[in-house]
Amino acid sequence: MKLLLVADEESPFLWDYYQPGKLAGIDLILSCGDLKQEYLEFLVTMANKPLYYVHGNHDKGYENFPPEGCECLDDELITVNGLRILGLGGCVRYNLGPFQYTEQEMDRRIKRLKRKLRKAGGVDIVIAHAPPKGYGDAPDNAHRGFACFLPLMDEFHPQYLVHGHVHQSYGHNIPRRLQYGDTTVFNAVGWHVLEVEPGPSVPISRSIFPWKKKARYDIINRTNTEQSL
């Protein structure tokens, strides 16, 4: 499946300067949060394909006016053409704003979903707003990652964990991709096209000490150039 990933920054290439055919071939749109409702409504209309989103910490307007024609994926596990997708929006709590969670709160959200995940035989893609702790996050309070994402990846081995929240403009060395075990952690700020095929059910493994897991880094510094799909 060909997925359009969007997060945090509305692309003039896909909005202001849109031309018919730019979204041809896209099967599914996934938003990692912090985008205008009008932008998502435009994309789902032009692509005429399903669009699923999770909340970012700046999506307060979604509470009263969610993007029309789009589906919220927060705390849901769905299967689209065999592709298993899990939504875990929000960021680490740093003030009293919306869609912010403590580490314990996010961990409880994950635990409530584990029965569904085991029944599905795992998950192919986790859509989040914040990154995992130590994998594409930043040291300031607002952009820390969730440590509880690490045992989630240890246990269910998703192909991808896709997030936003940490903009490339925050620093010259912010990676687009990182590798954690079997999972590629992908920063989707801006827009990107990703081709993914459903994976097999995997043996579920539990790591008692996930922070001792030796992770493999595969840092690829890529610029988010506006290029034709």
Image (tube, rainbow, N blue to C red):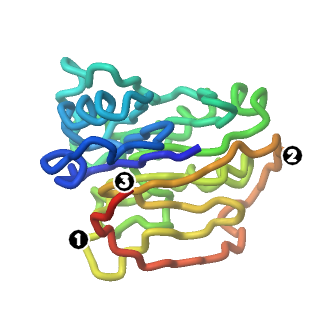
Please name the residue shown 54% across and 26% down the image: 76
Q: Amino acid at mark 2?
A: Pro
Residue behind mark 3: 164
Please name the residue shown 72% across and 68% down the image: 213
Q: Which mark is residue 169?
A: 1
Residue behind mark 2: 203
Q: Quadrant of residue 21?
A: top left
Q: Is residue 123 left or right of residue 93?
A: right
* Residue 100 locus on image (x, y percent): 33, 40
* Residue 188 locus on image (x, y percent): 39, 56
- The foreground one among 105 and 14 is 14
* Residue 160 locus on image (x, y percent): 59, 54
Q: Amino acid at mark 3?
A: Gly
Q: Are marks 2 and 3 in contact (CB under 8 Å)?
A: no
Q: How far apart are the two marked residues, 2 and 3, measured between alpha carbons?
A: 29 Å
Q: Residues within 10 Å of mark 1 (few under 14, many from 20)?
A: few
Q: How far apart are the two marked residues, 1 and 2, measured between alpha carbons?
A: 39 Å
Q: In this rendering, is residue 134 above or below 64? A: below
- The foreground one among 166 and 15 is 15
Which is nearer the N-term, disc 3 or disc 1?
Answer: 3
Please name the residue shown 70% across and 42% down the image: 198
Q: Amino acid at mark 1?
A: Ser
Q: Is residue 96 visible?
A: no
Picture quarter with the C terminus: bottom left
Please name the residue shown 51% across and 28% down the image: 75
Q: Is residue 142 left or right of residue 163?
A: left
Which is nearer the N-term, disc 1 or disc 2?
Answer: 1
The mark tally for this picture is 3
Picture quarter with the N terminus: top right
Q: Secondary structure at mark 3?
A: loop
Q: Looking at the image, which residue sits at the far left?
A: 16
